[in-house]
Every structure is written in structure tokens, then in C-alpha cells.
Amino acid sequence: MIRFKLIVAFIIAGVVTGGISNAGATCIGATPTWHSTPDRDSLATCVTNAISGDRIIVSSGTATWDSAVIWNSKNLTLIGAGIDRTIIISNAEIFQFGTGENPVANSSRITGFTLKCSAIPATSAARIQVAGRNWRIDNNKFDCAHVTSNQLGVYVRGSSKTSQSKGLIDSNSFYNARVLVQDYPGTSQRELNGTNHWSTPLGLGTDEAVYVEDNHFVLTVFGNVVDSNDAGRYVFRFNAVTDAYIEAHGIGNNEYRRGARKWEIYHNILNAAYRTPAFITFLRSGTGIVFNNTATGTFNAGYTIDHRRSYENNTQIGPCNGTSTWDGNNLTSGWLCRDQIGAGADSSTWPSGFAPPTQAAVPAYFFLNTRNGLNAPVEINPQANMHIIPNRSFYDYLPSFDGRTGVGSGKISSRPSTCQVGTGYWAIDEGEWNSLNAGPDGRFYKCSAANMWSLYYTPYTYPHPLRNTEVITPPAQPGGLTAH
């Protein structure tokens, strides 16, 4: 069930109204609580003065910024007066935190703002850029509804070779804005040296990912609502999407950059209401789980998977055809192609030379996804079907499941007693991970050896534990806080 609730609801006395200039910053208070007007200089002063663990309460009003407020060495909570009450308009980034080489600003939180694109936004600028671990961005509005291209609402851009980003993006509204998850963007062999983002455990069903849950996305322009590459990991769940699709990028053209590492996509509602989105999902790298998603309306394609190097030449590492050292070359086709659908962990961190580590094959699983009320099988780009093979690269749902191929679903008592290695089964009467649902929530078994079922996946706790501090009620605003 999708819930759209604005949980942060509070009134701050002494409201700032109308336009705000930058002539004379207004930041007052002391550790642990600071108060600011929404102009950039005031808020930047509070960020500078605050120490890790402090919170900064921003009054209502509208301000236009020309550069971001940045912090990398402290954990701060920024609390606006609520959606459409504290409004910041900018053509540039607005907030950037935790993005240093060894980020320590991990548990910062931004809540209660409207972050609005200016009339002609720079498409490379995000409203919020973040890295690090255990941060939260919630109950905000990303408003680019008036622009003609899809903008970056939240840009998760990892900056560490050995630490993966993780955090929570929840209960926000996105209008012509999206989430992009990238971990370490190595663009050369030298920059990839020593990176471990593809050699650490996959972590299905753990908190080792960027979680995007209970958000509302509306696009009036072409584009996706979430995307990933550079070993990014995301979980996209319990969201409502209008006129857009879900994506994960692979190794691109003329690049050394790695593809998306992991995706878990479930319990989302996608509706093609006024436009015809290109896909429902468009996944081109990595592995994961896609289940219980509902799509209605007209989409050009459905739950689609692809691999570009099957049919395009990457001028840095070559196509996947049996000649590139980046690939497994276990078959004459080049399979397992580096980072393709169904690719898992590297055997080691990336070396300094030109002999990349071997990569394991870890199939993806799709089940109980619908399109206009009917079961929706996975669609493979025909140009990539020499590398993306059913029941090897991925397993898809079969309503009549006998354990030999695909994925089944039902009560645990109905699971076949015999099975072929790699097949899967979703047991609907087991698993407790959704605290908002009475009764069992389901969990996934994999055939790990001939006729042997093993528990493989249970979704991570929902709602995400970082939402335990949901309601923020700031103290009354002190006197002396005025706009200049």
C-alpha cells in the first residue's frame, strides 16, 4: 500500500514571508539548536557554526540561491518549515554533504523543504548531492514541474574507493526530478585501481544500499525516476510513479566506468497516465530481485533487460565477443560479460594492471510483476540475447512452476520437492519484514543443489529503521530572527 503523508508538520513562530535578500545573514542559536532564515548566507553561517549532532531549523519563506551549502565533516539535521513553506529556488546544487574522499558526514538529515528548479536549470546540477552512510532525505518536494527535461533531485555520488554509499530517501514528492545512485566513478584503469565496490558481498536484503521508499514521482517529460551505475546499489520499493520508468545503467560506450551493482525493485505502482513511457523497467547491468510491481497504461516496452556491449563497441575495452580481457570469455560469445545482467562479485579488488579479476555469475529473479492486470514476462533486447539467457542470466515467473525452470510462488507446502539448480520459489506464507502488514510477508528460496531448496532472500525491514525518528517538532523560534 502506498502512503503519501507529510509527516513533518510543524509551525514555527515569527515566520519570514516574501522575498529574502542576502544582505545580512540571520543565524542565531547555539549547540545543539540553531535557527536560520532560508537565504543561503544565513543557512551557510549556521552550518559553519554548528557541530556534529546539531540541528538547524529554517523558517518559512522563499529564497533564491546561486550556489550550494556544503558540509563534509559533521552530521547535521536541517529542518524546514514544511513543504511549500520553506522554498529554495536555484539553478545550481542546493545542498551537498558527505562527498569528501573519506566522508564522515554520514547521518545528516534534510527534511521539510521545497527545493525548486529555476526557470532554466543546469541539467547537471542536483538539488541535493550526497555520499556517505546512514543519511536520510525525507518529506521534501523536488519541484521542477515547469522545466522541459528530467532533472536530478537527489544525486548519490560516492567518493570513496572502499566505502559504499547507503542511506534513505523517503516520503518525498518529485516533479520532473529523479534519483541517481553512483558509487565510485572510476573513469580509467588507474582510477579503478584498488576499488572494492564490486568485490564486496552483494548484500541482498540488507541495508547496504540506497533505499528509495514511499515517494511519489510525476514526470511530464521523458525519463526515469531512478538510475544507477558506477557500482551503485539501490532498493526501490513502495513508490508511486506516473509517466516514467525505472533504470539501471551498464558499462557504457567509450568508458571504463563500471555498471550498476545491485537493484531490488518491489511493491511499486507505475501508471502511464498522460504519456507513453519507454519501459516499465530498463535494467542493463548487475543483478537483483524484481517482484510484485504493478504497471497500468501504455508503455512501449515492459520489464526489459539489455546489455550494450553485446551490440556496441566500447572503444576502451572492446565489445563482449571473446576478445576483451574484461570479460569471462567462458564461451566464444565472451560470456560472462563484465557487469552484464546476472553478473556478481569480482574475485578481488581491482588491480593496478590490465588483467581484471574474474567475476561470478549471480542470476537475477523476476516474479509476480503485472502489466494491465496480467502477468508480465521479462523482455530481452533481441540484440543482447546471445549473452542474456533465461534460466542462466535470470529466472522469470512461471504460473505453472514444476521446479525445472523459472520461478514459482505459493505456500511453502506447494513448493515442488524436486528442483533444478538456480530456480527460485517465493513462499507467501513465510517471512516477517513488513511491519505494516498483518501476517506473513513472503520470502524467497533458491535451488542451491539438485532437489535442495535454501533460503536466499528476505527483503529488508520495512519501513526502513532510519524512519524510527519520523516526527520532528522543533522548539519555538526565538525572537530576533528576521529577514534582511
Image: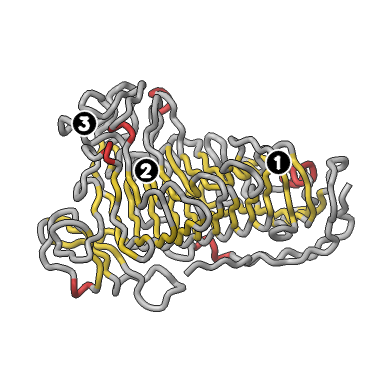
Using the numbered discs, state the Cα–Cα distance from disc 1 to disc 2 in whole angstroms: 35 Å
Q: Which residue type does callout 2 highlight?
A: Arg
Other residues around mark 3 within 10 Å, as few (<14) / some (14–19) / many (≥20): many
Per the image, the residue denoted by label 3 is 334
Q: Is residue 97 visible?
A: no
Closer to the observer: label 1 or label 2?
1
**Residue 27 in the image: above or below residue 473:** above
Query: Which mark, residue 261?
Result: 2
Query: In the rendering, which numbered label is found on residue 119?
Result: 1
Cα distance in 3D space between marks 3 and 2: 20 Å
Instruction: Label 1, secondary structure: give it.
Output: loop
Q: Of helix, strand and loop, which one carries label 2?
A: loop
Helix, strand or loop at disc 3? loop
Amino acid residing under circle 3: Gly
Residue 137 in the image: x percent, y percent? 59, 54
Q: How many marks?
A: 3
Dot 2 crowding, Cα within 10 Å, few <14, some 14–19, many 20+: many
